[in-house]
Amino acid sequence: MFSGFDFDVIWRNMPFLLNGVWLTLQLTIMAVTGGILLGLILAVARLSGIKPLAWGVAAYVNFLRSMPLILVIFWFYTLVPKLTGTSISGFYSVLIAFIMFEAAYYSEIIRAGISSVKRGQISAAMALGLTNLQAMRYVVLPQAIRNMIPVLLTQSIVMLQDTSLVYVVGLRDFLTSAEIVASRDNRPTELYLFVALIFLVVCFSASRLVNRLRRKYTL
Amino acid sequence: MIEIKNVSKWYGTFRVLDDCSMAIAKGEVVVICGPSGSGKSTLIKCVNGLEPFTKGEITVDGISVGARSTNLPKLRSRIGMVFQNFELFPHMTAADNIVLAQQKVLGRGAEEARAKAQELLARMGLSEQAAKFPAQLSGGQQQRVAIARALAMDPIAMLFDEPTSALDPEMITEVLDVMVKLAEEGMTMAVVTHEMGFARRVAHRVVFMDQGAIVEDATKADFFGKPRSERAQLFLSKILTH
């Protein structure tokens, strides 16, 4: 079936491709970490009961969730240097775009997780004399995190796939590196099959992990 | 010990509590009953400040629940509360449920808190269940763990909010037995319940509520012998004929 194919092209270009993989991983890990942290802050702000704050966050979340990611990437790539007058590297402008965009999604997941803890649990914690903060820390968050870990991971897998969009600003992520090799050596089929295989292995293992966590932590 | 004076509460224009006054002395067991929606649960939750009230005053051991200067968490730690749906923390074992507030609120050491938990679980007949999670326990067992959790704080009074309403009939007895023992040991108790057998056995007084108001506050003998209000008579005739 693969006669006429030359999969050796992948081995010959492995160091170059691995550089791309490295950039994709860096971007994903940093964007997931930053996105979850900002998302947590947004979620707590939205649940804080302080109306102007909650409205501001709601506006931010709804606005970003209505935008295509690629547009947000373009904005940060073109607008941020103009607005701030300083040039930042393509990598950081993309990273900021991802963090701000993903935070909108993560905040909704975290908010749902916190809201999913029954009101009676908070009453029980308070009745024992725990303060608001202690009730949050020892009773609400441990339950909320169990509820939201699978969804957070699923969102992060989507985010890993979305990182391939950075090719639009010329960053050399995994897909872009493969594309460069593919057109230079005129071997697009081999390279794109390879990219698909790697994404399949990574994303499938991750979603298996999600399922295991879901079974383990479902209360 | 617990004094409720002219307490009223509105949800918007709906009056949930209507000028309620009653007192519970040290060592007294008071059963609060009445049709659903009569405000019994709301009233009992006002006692430890879980529900705010609009007017009136509640004092527990001389401390005003509604006052801004009151340290509510501290006051709550001295009043045990048992809920209709148990509300055990599902991510912790039975023992850890009992240990948590002892350590975080009372500042007890891990060993002391654990020993106390074991002792209370033994008293509830649940020594074997210490390492189990709430989902692995029956409703009756969960409610007894919840009672142990409240008792671990060495409370000066215990509030029970329909503690047997969510239980299957065969499990009601095991929970009531524990409560009867507690009453006989002299614990100050306010119990919202429809279990008139329990009221007959251990209550000193019975308070009957209807539409947010305390309609009758009588000794047990008076309440079951000759309730004065028509509504209480009607209520009793309905629940005692079966």
Image: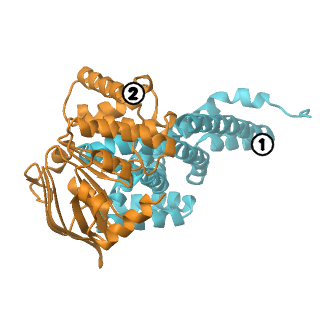
Chain colours: A cyan, B orange
Q: Residue furthest front?
A: B225
- Front residue of this view, candidates A99 and B224: B224
Amino acid at the residue labelled 2: Gly
Residue at x 43% of width, y 64% of height: B238
Chain bearing mark 1? A
- Front residue of this view, candidates A128 and A130: A128
Asked if residue A54 is positioned above or below residue A159 in the image, the reply reads below
> Which residue bears the numbered disc 1?
A188
> Which secondary structure lies at badge 2?
loop
Residue B89 in view? no
- Front residue of this view, candidates A90 and B98: B98
For the residues carrying marks 1 and 2, which lies nearer the camera in this image? Answer: 2
The image shows residue B138 at horizontal and vertical percentages of 50, 37
Asked if residue B67 is positioned above or below residue A170 in the image, the reply reads below
The image shows residue A115 at horizontal and vertical percentages of 43, 54
Amino acid at the residue labelled 1: Pro
The image shows residue B20 at horizontal and vertical percentages of 20, 67
Residue B125 tag number: 2
Q: Quadrant of residue A172?
A: top right
Residue at x 33% of width, y 71% of height: B231
Give the quarter of the figure containing the N terminus of chain A.
top right
Q: Residues within 10 Å of mark 1 (few under 14, many from 20)?
A: some
Chain bearing mark 2? B
Q: Image check: A112 left or right of B13? A: right
Q: Quadrant of residue A176?
A: top right
Residue B151 in view? yes
